[in-house]
Amino acid sequence: MGMVAFQEIEDAARRIRPHIRRTPVDLSTSLSDMTGVPVYLKLEHRQITGAFKVRGATNAVLSLSDAERARGVVAASTGNHGRGLAHAAKRAGIRCVVCMSSLVPQVKIDAIKALGAEIRIVGKSQDEAQMEVGRLIREERLVSVPPFDHPLIVAGQGTIGLEIVEDVPDVSTVFVPLSGGGLISGVAAAVKAKRPGVKVVGISMARGAAMHASLKAGYPTEVEELPTLADSLGGGINLDNSITFEMVRTLVDRVVLLTEAEIAAGIRHAYVQEREVIEGGAAVGVAALLARKVKSFGPTVLLLTGRSIDMRLHQSVVAGTNALMDAA
Ligand SMILES: *Cc1c(COP(=O)(O)O)cnc(C)c1O
């Protein structure tokens, strides 16, 4: 068990600064008018690779020893982490293997391949892909860079919190999409070190919210994974979670759950009112405000985390014809 210290986040910021984009913060007129407080959007979906995960991945890759660099890195991820890690490894000139199941769509495979990573397709589930990671660590001595439960990943994602406090010094509430909790752990640690009074709210989809279920149980718990518009927020928190469960329990003030229809409304509002194309997992902050599930009492920052959404899916959500929107 361990918590990531503020110093580790500042070290990460210095390390990754030349390699990542410092994303802007924009005032949302529509959401400010609706809530009566200034609402800002942290536009992290405009990060290189289209999601914030390149921050943690870059911090981890830049922290490798020479011996580890020579061995290369490995992860099981179909989405934003795999892409972020492939990008970081390419920049560092080291080997990167991404393991995924045969169910992963070809577009995602192509995106990661285009970044020069080796792809291993194994089995029909994320668990089987994870077993291949274990094999590669043992047999080819690759270094594992997991998506959230790792101090360098938490510290890298936490650099967003430093930027939020710099750009919105009077921030009172931060809304953060929540899955494995690497992002919110880092952001909460950074923001609360600078502004102890700030409230940090985590937001997940009701369909398969593993961290929420774990917090309720008091220990890391598995939940059934279901199709959701917020696909980047799916998956478990690891039954042997060693960092993020404890950090979320200690630092996060509230966790809010959303229906698929509410998430769809968030995607639509971001597009129609703010002209931003974001994926479901990135729209939950906007969605929570629209659904009036959380009240804001002062300057509020919503973290928009990624834009990896199939454009036909995006169109169907904006048009209100997507089938998942009616899911319970
Ligand atoms: C990974 C991810 C999240 C959640 O981050 P965790 O550290 O797993 O909580 C949110 N939004 C997007 C777009 C992501 O890719």
Image (spheres, grey):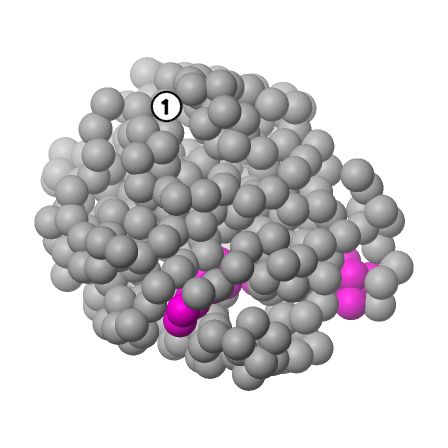
Rendered residue at 14%/34% (across/down): 67
Locate the N terminus by quadrant. Answer: top left
Q: Compared with residue 218, is residue 233 higher up or lower down, i.e. above or below? A: below
Residue, disc 1: 241
What secondary structure is marked by label 1? loop
Quadrant assignment for the C terminus: top right
Residue 13, by quadrant, is: bottom left
Residue under the point 16% across and 42% down: 5
Residue at horizontal 31%, vertical 57%? 198
Q: Position of residue 259 (x, y in %)?
A: 71, 46
Left or right? Give the position of 43 relative to 251. Answer: right
The answer to whether 15 appears left or right of 86 in the picture is left
User: Residue 102, how many percent across, how many down?
Assistant: 66, 31
Which residue is rendered at x = 84% and y = 68% of the image? 319
Decide which of 56, 188 is in the foreground and name it. Answer: 188
Q: How many marks?
A: 1
Give the image location of residue 180, x and y in percent. Answer: 45, 36
Q: Is residue 162 left or right of residue 213?
A: left
Residue toward you, 219 or 224: 219
Tell me: residue 121, above or below residue 168.
Answer: above
Visible residue check, residue 148: yes
Badge 1 crowding class, 10 Å Cα cut-off, few under 14, some 14 to 19, many 20 or more, is: some
Q: Is residue 144 in view from this perspective?
A: no
Q: Which residues are magenta?
A: 298-318
Question: Residue 306 in magenta?
Answer: yes
Which amino acid type corresponds to the residue marked 1 in the rendered image? Asn
Viewer-side residue, 113 vs 288? 288
**Left/right of residue 297 with respect to residue 167 in the rendered view:** right
